Amino acid sequence: DTEVTQTPKHLVMGMTNKKSLKCEQHMGHRAMYWYKQKAKKPPELMFVYSYEKLSINESVPSRFSPECPNSSLLNLHLHALQPEDSALYLCASSQDPGARGYGYTFGSGTRLTVV
Amino acid sequence: GDSVTQMEGPVTLSEEAFLTINCTYTATGYPSLFWYVQYPGEGLQLLLKATKADDKGSNKGFEATYRKETTSFHLEKGSVQVSDSAVYFCALPDRGSTLGRLYFGRGTQLTVWP
């Protein structure tokens, strides 16, 4: 299995809702990432988990809450989002926590719309 | 700090034309370099990579050579197809304090017409 699987593919949520994005990989990668991508822009790093511990939080608002229950799973819990949070949310994993030699394997993303 | 600079798009070509997308980097030493491709409505896929100077990465007819003299990693393809229409990102890893971050270029939109 050489994939990163993200669910759901599309999500529409209201500003008072609570929802979660899920990411799963079975490649034995020990680093997992959340990125946010706005239209026609490169991805922006949000969080890095290395060996199931949060190692990077790029000053992301607390309405985004990551969770890594085990080495294969990564969740992103969403609460009280704003319309400007609408974007494509990408999960990625890497064999090497520094991604220095191997790069990332990305999922296909969750397209989030906040109404 | 380390960074990549990618040529502005969009790029529009006819099928079977030659493609070059320029990418230059700024870094101390010789970091790994990557090209990612994003097809419409999808996530990013690793297209090719080079891990040291003078390496050539290749995949699906695309090539890029890591040239330390010009600090470049230009993406080339000899004959593009309609199916190559996508956004292409050049990237390099942060080797400093933000382990795990990839620095992406701005992205270049390629449209290939039949």
Image (cartoon, coloured by chain):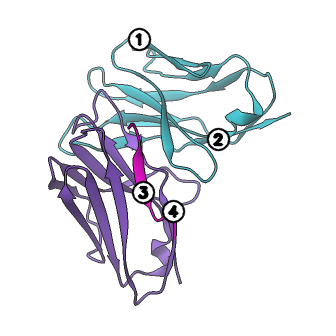
Q: Is residue B47 above or below residue A91?
A: above
Q: Is residue B66 above or below residue B91?
A: above
* Amino acid type at mark 3: Gln
Mark 3, residue position: A6
Q: Mark 4 points at which residue?
A: A9
In terms of image quadrants, where is residue B75? top right
Q: What residue type is labelled 4?
A: Lys
Disc 3 chain ID = A
Residue B58 position within the rendered picture, expressed as x and y whole percent measured from the top left: 52, 17
Q: In whole angstroms, how far apart are the C-alphas of marks 1 and 4?
A: 36 Å
Q: Residue at x 52, y 44 (%)?
A: B106
Q: Confirm or deny contact between disc 4 and disc 2 (CB under 8 A).
A: no
Q: What is chain A's hue in the picture? A: purple
- Indicate which disc residue B86 carries: 2
In the visual, does B107 lie left or right of B83?
Answer: left
Circles 2 and 3 on the same chain: no
Q: Are marks 3 and 4 in contact (CB under 8 Å)?
A: yes
Which structural element holds mark 2? strand
Marks 1/2 in contact by CB < 8 Å: the verdict is no
What residue do we see at 28% from left, 35% from top? A99
Give the CA separation, mark 3 to mark 4. Answer: 7 Å
Chain where mark 2 sits:
B
Reading the chain from its start, which is encountered first: label 1 or label 2? 1
State the separation of the CA atoms marked 1 and 2: 25 Å
Q: Calculate the distance from the C-alpha at mark 4 to the C-alpha at mark 2.
A: 19 Å
Q: Which mark is residue A88?
A: none
Q: Distance between the residues labelled 3 and 1?
A: 33 Å
Residue at numbered disc 1: B55
